Amino acid sequence: MISSICKAWQAVRASTDVSATSLDSAGLHLTRAQVLRGATAGAVLAGVALTAERAIAAKSARAKPISDIDRVYDAWQAFFNAGDIDGLIGLYTADVLYVDPDGKELVGKENVRKNLAGIIALKPQIVLGDRKHLVYRDTALTTNHWKLTIPNSDGSKQVVPGGGIEVMRRQADGGWRYIIDDASRSAS
């Protein structure tokens, strides 16, 4: 797409169609239409570049391994509250076992994605607190209590407390990922 826009812009600049309404800028004779087409092409190119830059930055932020277990929780909370399903899913292993708040077992990232997408559609905010981590070599048993705040259509808010028990494994890149996430209960 970018190459076709560049070619179009070059064609506009190379055209010899000069009318009485042309603009003379540094010896170039451009019509009003040519200037507008050029400005539009430039704006599109700038928008594409900015969008690509943001996507690359977001992807690289998600792709960085998180070597501190508590920071995994911080990232999970931030991605969840931002509605960033791709960021959330990046914190799980491909074959994760996820137990939803109703106790239903789901295996694999795509099943977790579907479940979390339904929850995120409600635009909730979550706070993960009372975090505890037991680490043995490359495996960690972690617990937390959470408070989910869900906005209602009338402007009021519903607060749902809960907890989770998770198992994380340190990956080859040094980062921790969830291999089991049980959001149906909390450990006291």
Image (cartoon, grey):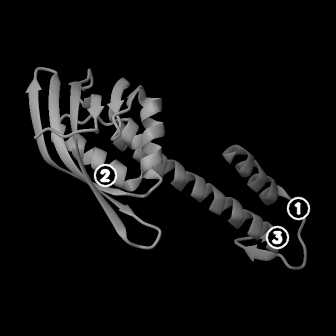
Q: Mark 2 is on which residue type?
A: Ala
- Report the Cα–Cα distance between label 3 and label 1: 13 Å
Q: What is the quadrant of residue 93 in the picture?
A: top left
| As drawn, 180 above or below 69 | above
Q: Going by the image, does 176 lie left or right of 19?
A: left
Mark 2 lies on a secondary structure that is helix
Give SS at disc 1. Answer: loop
Q: Is residue 35 left or right of residue 106?
A: right
Total number of numbered labels?
3
Cα separation, mark 2 vs mark 1, equals: 55 Å
**Image mark for residue 33:** 3
Amino acid type assigned to the residue bearing label 3 in the image: Ala
Q: Quadrant of residue 144?
A: top left
In the rendered structure, the answer to whether residue 11 lies left or right of residue 20 reads left
Q: Residue furthest bottom?
A: 21
Q: Position of residue 53 (x, y in %)?
A: 48, 50
Q: Residue at x 47, y 31 (%)?
A: 110
- Residue that mark 1 sits on: 16
Mark 1 crowd level (few <14, some 14–19, many ≥20, 10 Å Cα): few
Disc 2 packing (10 Å; few <14; some 14–19; many ≥20):
some
Mark 2, residue position: 78
